[in-house]
Image (spheres, coloured by chain):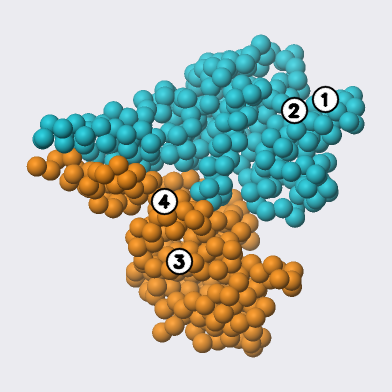
Amino acid sequence: MEAVRFENVKYSYRGDEAFAVNGVSLSIEEGQFVAVLGRNGSGKSTLAKLINALLEPTSGRVTVFGMDTLDAKKTFEIRKSAGMVFQNPDNQTVASVVEDDIAFGPENIGVPREEIGRRIEFALDAVGMQAFRKATPSRLSGGQKQRVAIAGVLAILPRILILDESTAMLDPKGRREVMEVVKKLNREQKMTVLLITHFMDEALEAERAVVMHRGEVVMDGAPEEIFARSDELESYNLTLPRAAAVCKRLQREGMPVGNAFTAEELAEVLCASLQRG
Amino acid sequence: MRIVAKGLTYTYDPKSPFAAQALKGVDLTIEEGEFFGIIGHTGSGKSTFVQHLNALIRLTGGALKVGDYDLSDKKCRFIELRGKVGMVFQYPEYQLFAETVEKDVAFGLKNFRKGMREEEISAAVQEALETVGLNYAAVKDASPFELSGGQKRRVAIAGVIVTRPEVLILDEPAAGLDPLGKQELMQLLHSIHGSWCKTVIIVSHDMDEIAENCTRAAVFSEGRIAMEGTPAEIFRRADELLALGLDVPTTAKCAMLLRGRGIDIDTDFTCEDFAEKVLALWRAKEGGDA
């Protein structure tokens, strides 16, 4: 089933010709894990906000599970289907106790009390934060706060999870924690994931990567395939993962090495060519 | 200004149930002229340490000297020190507040250099904005909130360097920027470092950034210094860093894996140098085969 569909969508913040999203057509299947790459200001966050009707397209059409985001009667249903986690962990908690914070979303949409209890359990389990249910969010680490933010979104039972640079403010351990949770949700719950990121290694975890440049989708494919088109990627001012940059350099000097995207893969291909013969 | 810390200790909320000892005896010397990196995960004490350097946190245990300023001396001229040791916090753009870019950048200067004439202030603001790569005439009357994220960060940095600090400390200066934005910011720091700013200290989680930019670095762990040295010396101990729960640069991880398979690469772990050394090994092997 198609989770998200963009049909020639344009959006301008000031209502003029400066389109932040400029003619995007895109289809995302339910269960897909899609990374969105692009420079600051390339339109990534605008794209995300168009999905859950925080923004309405200036022209074109956005549908979420077939529901048009311009249809005011569907806004509520769309926002329940597509949950969003933002960048700053400190701006996304409302309560002083973790489980109350998670309950905030379902309480607002009128979920019955017993059902809220079940959803808190589910959400805490999903993000591995059971031990912190009575903790105060402000005393948690950045990675733990973002996991609570994700849990708060999960309690609405969304079918699409949108992460808008949700790991940008975290340390490497916090980033790993959040990425593990996201991958698990995608794998086990078949959650559709849209991950907006500047970290190329995170994009490698996705099954599909979309590159945005000046409001347009300019590349769309498997992450490995996109990183293999390095010249094109650089023309959009994006850099290769460092392992891939090393490979490219070696290939240019005539050394016969394959492509690699991670340190492990780089070690493999270097071993293969240095120990051959 | 040379920075010398000896046996530095610090406890947050002492005598309360939340008491937490953030520094447990830090000995560290940062020489004038260094581009120094500070590594460590959340809670390792690195932010507590850097906030001591311009007396945002007052010394409670141990000794600390920054140039001729002895921070254990209660009569130390702290205001003067803060004009010489500039601090750029994480996400400094959240601290912008004035109606115009010019007023925002001038704020620190007016506070540190009382009695400066208006035209001197304007000239200093213009120079600071141009140093960070912004066009003074184009941005001076704009609201800082109208600018893009990358521009906001530059304005915030301009507001600190406008006093021309001899030591500039930046906490995660490139966090949240796209890869090219990160590179541009690092180039900016190197250009400042080459002139009036003698020492730059960056706190970073990005090990590739440390490997590619710093002369030396220190690894903080549980309130102490776990390692100290050049990036090459530190990242050669990749296995220990991983054991501390820290990341290592892609090249260092790769070198570690290669060493495990009998291939030793002596590199400083920048991508450039790593590729050079791999090519040298390959050419030697090809030559040997021929």
Mark 2, Cα crowd under 10 Å, few <14 / some 14-19 / many 20+, is: many
Residue A219: image tag: 3
Decide which of tag 3 and tag 4 comes sooner along the chain.
3
* Closer-to-camera residue (A38/B92): A38
- Mark 2 vs mark 1, CA separation in Å: 8 Å
- Chain B drawn in what color? cyan
Q: Quadrant of residue B238?
A: top left
Q: Are marks 1 and 3 on the same chain?
A: no
Residue B213: image tag: none
Q: Are marks 4 and 2 on the same chain?
A: no
Residue B105 drawn above or below residue A68: above
Question: Which chain is represented by orange in the image?
Answer: A
Residue drawn 42% across the image and 47% down it: A173
- Mark 3 vs mark 4, CA separation in Å: 14 Å
Disc 1 designates what residue?
B113
Disc 2 designates what residue?
B163
Q: Are marks 2 and 3 on the same chain?
A: no
* Closer-to-camera residue (A261/B13): A261
Q: Chain of mark 1?
A: B
- Mark 1 vs mark 4, CA separation in Å: 45 Å
Residue drawn 41% across the image and 78% down it: A30
- Mark 1 vs mark 3, CA separation in Å: 52 Å
Disc 4 designates what residue?
A240
Mark 2 touches mark 1? (CB < 8 Å): yes
**Mark 2: amino acid:** Thr
**Mark 1: amino acid:** Arg
Say whether residue B16 is visible: no
* Closer-to-camera residue (A137/A80): A80
